[in-house]
Structure formats: structure tokens, C-alpha cells
Image (cartoon, grey):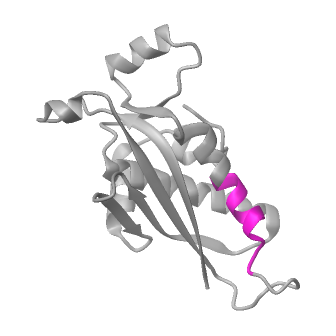
Amino acid sequence: MDMRFTYRFEAAHRFMGASSAKCMTPHGHTWWIHLQVTSQSNRLNSNQMMAEFAALKQPWKAFIDSCLDHSFFHHKDDPVAVACAEHIPGFRGLSFPGDPTTEIIAILCFAKAAKIIEKFNNDNDAQFSVQKIEIQETPTNAIILDSSDPIISETLSSLNASEKAWWNQAATDYRG
């Protein structure tokens, strides 16, 4: 049995390596993120649930609110982000190992969700896993990743990222 959580957030991004001036200019979107988790258990708990919705979705929603919503997604070497951090008190930037394309946002959010769900499982003696994530950048553009998609593990291993990278942390307020 699967559970799905859907949230909307506002965020901006820009690409340093794009061929289009539109994509190189900081711009924002109303994003939608859909997270689908699967229970590895074949039975409901004593309350006739897989888990309480609130308990399972709270850490995911906390991550969205504290790190994604009203943030500027940027390449780790983006001079625009450096200037923003210098001149905007409380600048909300989220660093990516390359350009924050919808594809890489989806892959890293998938990894982040997996860490959050792993912590939930450990804290609650539960057995959930991330099944699918969908990142909708605009009403017409979305990336959908399924847990069996090899691009997730291939991309994550190619990044050689530190365990301290935001997507490798279960913490929901991490903005590294």
C-alpha cells in the first residue's frame, strides 16, 4: 500500500551553463512536489493505518518549508548566489553540485526523502520506502522518478558528495 503527499512551494533558480538567456537569468516558479512512499508491511497497525499521515509527512513538509520554499536554487559556484548571500540578510539559497535543473532537483529531493523516511523508520519501528517523486516546475513540465530508475543511483554516485551534503542528511532544516 502506498501513501502520497503533495505540496506546493515557490522557488527561483538559474543555470550557469544554459544556452538560453531565459534560463541563465534568475527566475521563479510555483513548484509542486509529490512524494509517494510504500509500506513494506503487509498489515495495518493497531489504529487500522499504515501510519498516521501527520507523523509520516511532518518531517517532509518541514524540509519543504525550511529549505525549498522561497529559496534560490543555485550552482555551488554561482557568483549571483554569493552576491545575494552578501547583500540579503537571511538569504535563502540552496546549493546544488551543478545547475539546479528540474532533473537534478528531483534526484536530490528523492535522496533527501529517502534519508527522512529512513529516520522515520528508525524512530518508529516502521518499514517505509520512497517509491516515487514528481517535481512539477510548471503546469507543463515535470520530472517523475521511480525508485527503480537507475539514473538516481548513477547520478548520486557520480556526485561523490560528502555525507554532509543537504540531500544526504535526514535533518529537515539543513540548508548547506
Q: Residue at x 28, y 59 (%)?
A: 140
**Image x and y of residue 156, in percent:** 40, 52
* Residue 96 versus residue 107 in the image, above or below: above
Residue 57 sits in quarter: bottom right
* Residue 110 versus residue 46 in the image, above or below: above
Q: Residue at x 64, y 82 (%)?
A: 40
Q: Quadrant of the N terminus?
A: bottom right
Q: Quadrant of the C terminus?
A: top right
* Horizontal side, residue 156 vs residue 114: left or right: left
In this orientation, does residue 147 appear?
yes
Which residue of the protein is positioned furthest toward the left in this rendering? Answer: 19
In this rendered view, identify the residue nearer to me: 72 or 77. 72
Residue 23 sits in quarter: top left
Which residue of the protein is positioned furthest toward the right in this rendering? Answer: 46
* Residue 61 versus residue 21 in the image, above or below: below
Which residue of the protein is positioned furthest toward the bottom in this rendering? Answer: 42
Q: Residue at x 55, y 56 (%)?
A: 7
* Residue 85 versus residue 157 in the image, above or below: above
Q: Is residue 57 magenta?
A: yes
**Image x and y of residue 111, in percent:** 50, 55
Q: Residue at x 57, y 38 (%)?
A: 67
What secondary structure predominates along the stretch shown in magenta?
helix
**Image x and y of residue 107, in percent:** 40, 55
Q: Which residues are magenta?
A: 50-60
